[in-house]
Amino acid sequence: MIKILIADDQAMVREGFGALLAAQPDLLVVGAAADGAQAVAETRRLDPDVVLMDVRMPVMDGLEATRRLLADPAASRPRVLILTTFDLDDYVFEALRAGASGFLLKDAPAADLVQAVRVVAAGEALLAPSVTRRLIAEFTARPAPRERPRPTVLNALTARETEVLRLIARGRSNAEIAADLVVAEQTVKTHIGRILAKLALRDRAQAVVLAYETGLISPGE
C-alpha cells in the first residue's frame, strides 16, 4: 500500500485528488495540508511514501517545504511530486535541486495522476519528455555559461554513459534514447541506473539539472 499526503491550498484540488487516489486498491491517502508548514508537520507525523506538493501556498511555499522534508538524511524522506500549472513555475528548478522527484501537471488526465504516484513511489522520477523540454527551453533563455573544464564528478562516467546523460538532458525518453543509440530500451535503463548511482543522484530529474549546471550540455545545444 502506497501512503500519500496531498499538499495544496485549494480544498477542491485536495478533495478531488484524494477521492481519485483513494479509489485505487494500492493507494492510501493518509492526510492533507493547506500550506507548506502544515505539509512538513503532517509528513513528519504521518510518514507518507509520496507527497503531492503544490508550489504556491501560503505560510510556507512548496519549495521551502520540499527543502525541509528532504534536507535531513536522518529523517524519513518521502518522494515529493511537485504540482504545477502548464506554465512552469519559477520555483521548479530549485525544487529539483532540493530533491523533488519530478512534476505533475494539474491539468493532467486522472490516469496520469495515479501512474505518477506509483512511478515515484517505486523510486523512479516522473519527468515526462514534454516537461523536460520545457525545462530546456527555460535554460535556453538564460545566458550561455563561459567555457569551463569538464567537472571531475563526470569522470566517473563512461563515454556511453556520458552520451546517455546528454540525451536525457535534451528531453529524450528511454525509447528515443534506445533508437538514437541503436540499443535495447533495457540497456538504456541499465545505463541510467549506473549514471544515477555513480553521480549520487536520486532520479532522472536531478540528472537533467546536473547536466546543465556542470556544462555537459549548453542552452540551445
Image: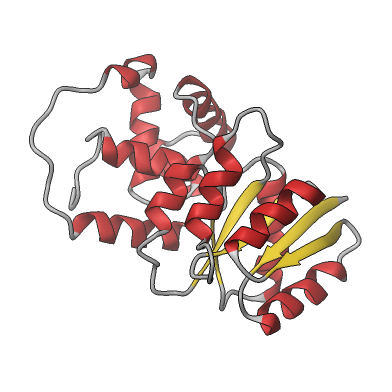
Is residue 209 placed above or below 143 in the rendered structure? Answer: above
Going by the picture, which residue comes out furthest to the front?
59
Residue 176 horizontal/vertical position (percent): 44, 48
Using the image as rendered, state which of residue 169 and residue 23 is in the foreground: 23
Residue 174 horizontal/vertical position (percent): 50, 45
Going by the picture, which residue comes out furthest to the right?
25
Is residue 110 placed above or below 150 in the rendered structure? Answer: below
Residue 185 horizontal/vertical position (percent): 55, 39
Residue lying at 27% horizontally and 61% vertically, measured from the top left = 137
* Residue 180 visible in the snapshot: yes
Residue lying at 22% horizontally and 35% vertically, measured from the top left = 215
Residue 98 horizontal/vertical position (percent): 47, 43
Residue 25, image quadrant: bottom right
Residue lying at 37% horizontally and 24% vertically, measured from the top left = 160
* Residue 172 visible in the snapshot: no
Q: Is residue 88 left or right of residue 54?
A: left
Residue lying at 49% horizontally and 25% vertically, measured from the top left = 200
Q: Is residue 23 left or right of residue 143?
A: right
Using the image as rendered, state which of residue 185 and residue 106 is in the foreground: 106
Q: Is residue 91 left or right of residue 139?
A: right
